[in-house]
Image: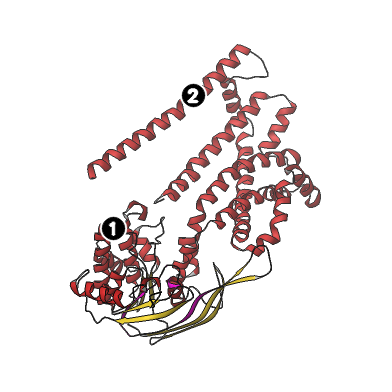
Amino acid sequence: MAISAVAGASASSRAARTATLIKFSMFVLFLVIWQTLAFMLAQPDFPSFTQTLSALYYHSVSGDLIINVAITVTRVAISFILAMLLGSIFGIAMGARAWFNHLSDSFLIILLNVPALVVIILSYIWIGLVEAAAITAVVINKIPTVAVMLREGARTTDPKLAQVAQVYNIPWWRFMRKIYLPQLYPFFLAAARNGLSLIWKIVLVVELLGRSDGVGFALHSMFQFFDIAGILAYTMAFIAVVFMIEWVCFTPFDARIQRGR
Amino acid sequence: MSALSIHINQLAYNVQNENSTTKASERIIADIALDIKPNECVCIVGPSGCGKTTLLNAVAGIINTNNDDVNGNVSGNIMLQFTTPSPTIGYIFQEPRLMPWLTLYENIALVMPNDDPVKITAILDAVGLAAQANSYPNHLSGGMQRRASIARAFVIEPQILLLDEPFVSLDAPTAMQCRELLISLAKIHKSTIIFVTHDLNEALYLGDRVVFLSPSPARIIHELALNNVCEAYDSAAQINLKSELFNRFPKILEGQLSQD
């Protein structure tokens, strides 16, 4: 049994290596196609991969790319944390308590369907062209989708496990940490993954409309100069950041919640 | 070790109907009065759906008449008297109910007020799972999960132990192994036991007394004191006892004393 376990482990690590190799080759293939296409078209509006790379270098060294990306990442981080926290609390409360769900269900549907742009414009008008307005707009846009996801999670929690806690007098905080919240982690991760992609897209719109720094603002000014290589360079930089967040935060969390399941 | 007196009267679930304002009331237990001596093992036998689990849940405090249960709100009288004030209660459920995201060690530490590695290791050793302390429940066999749930119940040194058909899903040798384990641990901890089962052999083997229930709403229809006559599972004494019982009450497992 021990031998077959070792063999199984090496087979699964081999499968993992193959998967990584395939992912990496697809990425390289994409870059090659991009480069070839740009070379064949030879249009100034369609810069090649190497031109984008040199624009990335130029904007990082002599421009504000690094500071702009840092500012946007900060805005994304603050909005993300606030939206996840508030959205989870609302969602769990709605899933766990039927009366609270009745109370807030129509409100949730309204929030889900108000266009992001309307929320952004209104919060700039009502709060002013300040940082708080920008963050508020992003958070309000994101809360309902987190709440919907966590509500589903809270509805699927197993009352039989809660009975174990009741019989064995498990303190409330330990019950939350070891029994209740672990049942919600997969939902929390799903909300975080699609939340991050949605939030950083909205943050750019918010910056474009009412901030004088950040990636959104930079894209806006490059649009006016038709600096397409610059726009692609910024996109590239931001995608790199998102990949890093995926590797540093989400993948380890995912591995953690998969343990034992 | 604690003596226990139970009196449950007219216990019902009141379920709010989805489409109307009326409440449907389902009476589960008509009247059950049981006095259980310290260190006694009482086996409860009855047809399925007769309220056996409800009885255990009432003793465990999972259902009470002040709170809403998952099945709706509960009405009726539940009177529980223990000789020890607020005794520790262990409960082995029909399913192992281990947390899949915690290792066996963590699952057992979960129910203890303070993490006590010596105690946890000792109990895992006693149920033969010391080597699996760091395994997750889903990676173990059904019998191992069952033994882990026994370990979890005994680690708190329960004065009262409740068991709800805990060995039904196991194959015969594994179930026997678990029964032996239960007997030896119960001897060490001197727990007072209420054991719900629909397996008469199991009841006759484990119980000091067997209590037979009627179909829902449940009441006690017959009691049988055993005084350790069945020394082994399927012993001659047990087979005799069983045939004697079936001769007198052919339909006792269906909850009926009369022939018709």
- Label 1 is placed on what type of residue? Asp
Please state if A72 lies on the left or on the right of A115 as rendered.
left
- Label 2 is placed on what type of residue? Val
User: Farthest residue toward the bottom?
Assistant: B83
Height in image: A180 above or below B233? Answer: above
Label 2 chain ID: A
Q: Position of residue A68 (x, y in %)?
A: 64, 38
Q: Which numbered tag is attached to residue B171?
A: 1
Q: Nearer the viewer, residue A62 or B210?
A: B210
Q: Secondary structure at mark 1?
A: loop
Tell me, yes or no, if residue B83 can be seen here. Answer: yes
Say whether residue B169 is magenta.
no
Label 1 chain ID: B
- Image-quadrant location for residue A164: bottom left
User: Farthest residue toward the right?
Assistant: A125
Q: Residues within 10 Å of mark 2 (few under 14, many from 20)?
A: few
Tell me, yes or no, if residue A132 can be seen here. Answer: no
Height in image: B141 above or below B30? Answer: above
Q: Position of residue A133 (x, y in %)?
A: 73, 50
Q: Nearer the viewer, residue A49 or B100?
A: B100
Tell me the magenta residue range. B27-52
Q: Which numbered tag is attached to residue A28?
A: 2
Q: Quadrant of the N terminus of chain A?
A: top left
Q: Residue at x 71, y 36 (%)?
A: A217
Q: Secondary structure at mark 2?
A: helix
Q: Residue at x 60, y 16 (%)?
A: A38
